[in-house]
């Protein structure tokens, strides 16, 4: 005789109930509750993480694309501020160092300026020169 899947499932539950009794059904219901709770939690986490990622992407400012080079021996404050990690205070420190000690002889000499370390130097190396015209601009 042909049985539907539903009838087979009901028979499995009845056999389980006969074998385990009421305590077995309680364990099974707790397990199913836990599985449902975890699935809802995972779905919630996916929604929250995707919306958090969207907010972070919107909030993160885009870095300006720079092209050209800047002569650190002749650049003014505004030109120096275009450089990554260089603000008004550091730009003024560069100019003060330059007036007190003369022009920079090596690119690495810029680390003598207060506020510029090795990490900043690594970011600046592609943009700074010691001779020639300043051509650096934001795009």
Image (cartoon, rainbow, N blue to C red):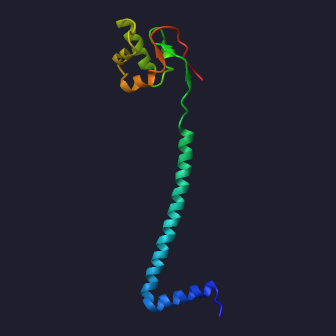
Q: Quadrant of residue 26?
A: bottom left
- Above or below — where is 77 with respect to 38? above
The answer to whether residue 121 of the structure is visible from this angle is yes
**Percent x, y of residue 94:** 40, 14
Residue 97 lies left or right of residue 40; in this view the side is: left
- State the residue at coordinates (49%, 19%): 127
**Percent x, y of residue 11:** 55, 89
- Above or below — where is 119 with respect to 75? below
- State the residue at coordinates (42%, 11%): 95
Which quadrant would the N terminus be assigned to in this image? bottom right
- Above or below — where is 103 with respect to 57? above
**Percent x, y of residue 96:** 39, 11
Which residue occupies the foreground of this view, 78 or 106?
Answer: 106
Which residue occupies the foreground of this view, 127 or 32?
Answer: 127
Q: Quadrant of residue 100?
A: top left
The answer to whether residue 86 of the structure is visible from this angle is no
What count of labels does the image hold?
Answer: 0
């Amino acid at each position: 005789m042909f049985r539907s899947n539903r009838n087979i499932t009901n028979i499995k539950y009845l056999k389980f109930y006969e074998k385990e009794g009421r305590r077995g059904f309680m364990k099974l219901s707790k397990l199913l509750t836990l599985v449902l709770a975890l699935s809802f939690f995972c779905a919630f986490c996916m929604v929250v993480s995707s919306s958090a990622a969207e907010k972070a992407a919107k909030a993160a400012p885009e870095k300006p694309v720079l092209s050209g080079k800047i002569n650190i021996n002749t650049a003014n404050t505004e030109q120096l501020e275009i450089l990554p990690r260089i603000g008004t205070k550091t730009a003024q420190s560069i100019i003060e160092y330059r007036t007190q000690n003369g022009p920079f002889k090596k690119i690495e000499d810029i680390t003598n300026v207060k506020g510029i370390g090795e990490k900043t130097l690594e970011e600046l190396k592609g943009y700074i020169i010691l001779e020639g015209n300043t051509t650096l601009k934001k795009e």
